[in-house]
Image (spheres, rainbow, N blue to C red):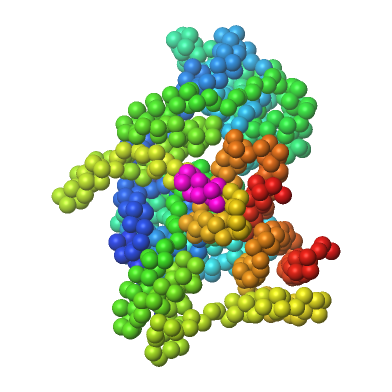
Amino acid sequence: MALLVDKLRPRTLDALSYHPELSDRLRSLAQSGDFPHLLVYGPSGAGKKTRVIATLKELYGPGVEKIKIDARVFQTTSNRKLEFNIVSSVYHLEITPADVGSYDRVVVQELLKEVAQTQQVDLGAKQRFKIVVINEADHLTRDAQAALRRTMEKYSPNLRLILLANSTSNIIAPIRSRTLLVRVAAPTESDICSALHMAGKKEGWAESEVLNKRIAKESGRNLRRALLMFESIYAQNEKVTDKTLIPPPDWEALVTLTADEILAERSPARLLHVRARLYDLLTHCIPPTTILKTLTFKLVARVDDALKPDVIKWSAFYEHRIKLGSKVIFHLEAFVAKFMRIYESYLMGMDF
Amino acid sequence: MASSFFNNKARAAAAAASGSSKLKAGDNKEDSTRLQPWVEKYRPKTLDDVAAQDHTTKVLRRTLQASNLPHMLFYGPPGTGKTSTILALAKSLFGPALYRSRILELNASDERGIGIVRDKVKNFARAQLSQPTGLDAAYRAQYPCPPFKIIILDEADSMTQDAQSALRRTMETYSRITRFCLVCNYVTRIIEPLASRCSKFRFKMLDNSAAGERIASIAEQEGLQLEDGVVDTLIRCGEGDLRRAITYLQSAARLVGATKPPIAKDADDDAEMTDVGSNSSVITVSSIEEIAGVLPEDILDSLVEAMQPKSSGSVYEAVSGVITDLVADGWSATQLVGQLYRRVVFSEAIPDIQKNKIVMLFSEMDKRLVDGSDEHLSMLDLSLRIAGVLRGN
């Protein structure tokens, strides 16, 4: 049994329910025969991947849906072996080079060259080129991006790239200028509501409009999250009314709890306690940035207006440190300590 | 066994090659020109075509008449025509027949390092000039064909120091038969001994009128319909980089389907196409901005408005609301930082002393974004701190 998110994922450009002008554009690009390299960016849960898959289908027909997963082994210059998973159909490949960390350059170079040097085997194919979809392109290292740059020009008859990224900030300018930028904005709350409404109707669930609106608000304009929440609510409750509680994810509940604890007492002992909580979150593979961000916004909501810019300032400061440093817990803890200090000194009305 | 295997493979390869070349000759002809990036397609063919670098082209034209050339170092911001100039010069010096044997073009971003300099460059540099055969007098009259070769090192500033030092002696030893042309963005990254061996040419930022003419002429040749102000928008978004502006133009043309070749298909398909063509083949200002990822002015306005100090309460709610929307709509933080910066710096309403402080914030934020910080937090921090400065503390 598949999750709603997968089951109801639109398969064609026509089935997409929002951003109609974007769908039109993608369609005209796919039909023109002159398909450029694409860089698709937008927040997570906005439907980037869905649009890309639909575009692929528009380009090649239903053949792209027959996919298989290969595990390939690459060898680095220092003779290290890398295991790498490739999702592929006859017409396209899908890779996540960020999986192999700093060795992504090896994968990008070898794999793309290999793909680019072979022509399309299927003579009946609609397009002569193959498409390589690169997930999380913003996590590619500079080296890998520089390697892409040459590949994009040299092999463009046989190869088109679709890069998926959350933001274009980390993509180097030469790549940005070689691709067509496609921005996928997050769906609005009413878009989410109508998507939930459709999902409910398909499943035959009795639904409540007010609840849908609450879910849409709670999801932060992330459709994937909204659908998951929607499904979990219906799985947990037999009868759903307007006032049914929306259960937050476990980790979020824990972060909320931590925020409460920080606000309740500011002392070294509490800091030690909070550290245990943070470790708990980290060992469950919650990304540190997510922890810090969620914690910040929970705290900001509860402190006085005058303090808010300060909290944000330090949060951004330590987030930057997390990215630069190597030991995440130091910076998370430092943020908590810093927050306790500025909060305490604000309450006492003096600096120390 | 092995030999027959190899034979087979070789034969198959040969067959495939001949087959594909035939295939290419057959149906790729009109494809290849259409699929070519316009940046390549409209690269200037002669020195006279190079837009708006009068000083440099004048000097070079004189050397063209004298048939002598110093070593050269071209530097300037991207997209100002450095590579185009040297390629155009090389073409007008040697013409198509000699171009291959007299020019070595190395793109430093792929093949750099001392090994390449020692092997490839040195070997090319010391090779004796091949005497052209079968060139008639007309060819000679048209192209001067001076007795030296040119080695073009593109993106020379990304060459390692070692590789650059390895060039030093090579440049002098073979200067009788070889000239070097280094092309780079940052002249400071070229080591001093190399720079002093070259005559330097600075390429200035393109001024708007020259870039505008160029874009307009490309649009005309491609048969595009442009809305009023599109050319200005392109220049603004390109920020002095003509290549970027042309790429944007091509992307826009693809998007609106103006380059779509008129293929007659079955009836309903055709109807749809003409339908698309009739209402969207005009390139609009907003489509250019969308491609360039430029934030619309009204979003920026609302952010600036939200940052203004309020008489009562804090700006937090307003600013965080705008930023949350910005993030959800997927706008890029670097773009926001750039546009906001221009807003603030050119704003008359902000006193200079505050601008000083604000500019420091921008510098810090740019560094953070490059390091890969979270965009949401960084943007929020930046706007809140600017708001703080505006309030006067």
Q: Determine whether B202 is above or below B377 in the image.
A: above
Q: Across the whole image, how many numbered discs are drawn on residues?
A: 0
Tell me if residue A313 can be seen.
yes
For image coordinates 41% across by 63% down, the residue present is A188
Q: Main secondary structure of the magenta part?
A: helix
Q: In front: B193, or A73?
A: B193
Q: Determine whether B69 is above or below A47 in the image.
A: above
Q: In front: B256, or B121?
A: B256
Q: Quadrant of residue B258?
A: top left
Tell me if residue A66 can be seen.
no
Range of residues picked out in magenta = B294-306
For image coordinates 32% across by 33% down, the residue present is B225
Q: Provide residue A137's location: percent of width, then percent of height.
A: 55, 57
Q: Provide residue A233's location: percent of width, then percent of height.
A: 44, 83
Magenta stretch: includes residue B299: yes
Q: Quadrant of residue B381?
A: bottom right
